[in-house]
Amino acid sequence: MNATPHERRRTNAAPGRARAANAAEVRSAPERPGLGPETTPWPVAGADAGSRAAPGEGTTLLIIAKEPVPGRVKTRLTPPYTSTEAAALAEASLTDTLHAVLAMPALRRVLVLDGRPGPWLPPGFTVVRQCDGGLDERLAAAFAACRGAALLIGMDTPQVTPALLAPALGADGWHDCDAWFGPAADGGFWALGLANPDPELLRGVPMSTAATGAAQRRRLTDAGLRVRDLPVLRDVDTARDAERVAAEAPGGRFARTLARLSRTGAG
């Protein structure tokens, strides 16, 4: 879960307003501090407006992502790929992730998006706009809008499967557990789950460094949370990463897109 160079330079450039696509639901609510205007708390069914669900009553699955627009995504893949090819790989990675999440048990599935939905978005997701600010602020805002347990992943691990997240999403996933942490091979993290989402657990954590994962996990343990770990996964940041991830999930859209682009380049 890394910020691109563009994101690290971004200050208050407002992302485009998310719009409904492919039967996805887009929430409309008054502006709240730190949240995009379409973001409102996603209450647990049957819960009072001010209450939080107890662990085990269901988990909200969050995907934080960016619209796959050439020049704004996967910039570290160029070269060897063109910006258009890098965007195609980003779209394939996001699509694989969305379909994996659809196959997972969840109270609600929410796409926290910088940009607009496209034809790559399947039905079954609530779409909300990312807030402005650094990656730590955007992750914090996503959790702040949740009531009850929530688990967040990014769009850079197309090899994710329901089986990888099964320990966190099972009936006893939150038994004697306050947080789930998915470390990334590059030192970051690809998944973060919180039984009781608290945005202060993310704000101020330095993002997009080789020490980000360690710093985030330490923030959790310093807060006294009981943390369980998920398997280490590799983010797709470089061309070499793309090759390795495609080899791990050869049947996915990402692997097929990479193979097609490789054949085109070879030709």
Image: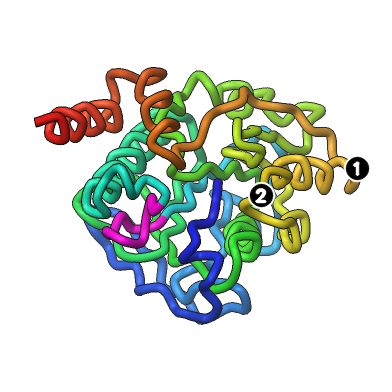
**What amino acid is found at the position of numbered circle 1 in the picture?**
Gly
Label 1 sits on a secondary structure element that is loop
Quadrant of residue 267 within the rendered picture: top left
Q: Which residue is mark 1?
A: 224
Is 73 included in the stretch rendered in magenta? yes
Residue 102, above or below 145: above
Q: Main secondary structure of the magenta part?
A: loop
> Magenta span covers which residues?
66-75
Quadrant of residue 186 within the rendered picture: top right
Query: What residue appears at the point 33 percent right and 49 percent down from the top-left corner?
Result: 78
Residue 170 is marked as none
Residue 209 is marked as 2
Is 102 included in the stretch rendered in magenta? no
Question: Dot 1: few (<14), some (14–19), or many (≥20) neighbours within 10 Å?
Answer: few
Residue 152 vs residue 132, the one in the foreground: 132
Q: Which percent across, then down, holds residue 257?
A: 22, 33
Outermost residue, left side: 267
**What amino acid is found at the position of numbered circle 2 in the picture?**
Thr
Q: Is residue 5 visible?
A: yes
Query: What residue appears at the point 30 percent right and 32 percent down from the top-left corner?
Result: 254
Query: What residue appears at the point 32 percent right and 47 percent down from the top-left corner?
Result: 79
Residue 9, above or below 266: below
For the residues bearing labels 1 and 2, Cβ distance under 8 angstroms: no
Q: CA distance from mark 1 to mark 2?
A: 24 Å
Q: Earlier in the sequence, mark 1 or mark 2?
A: 2
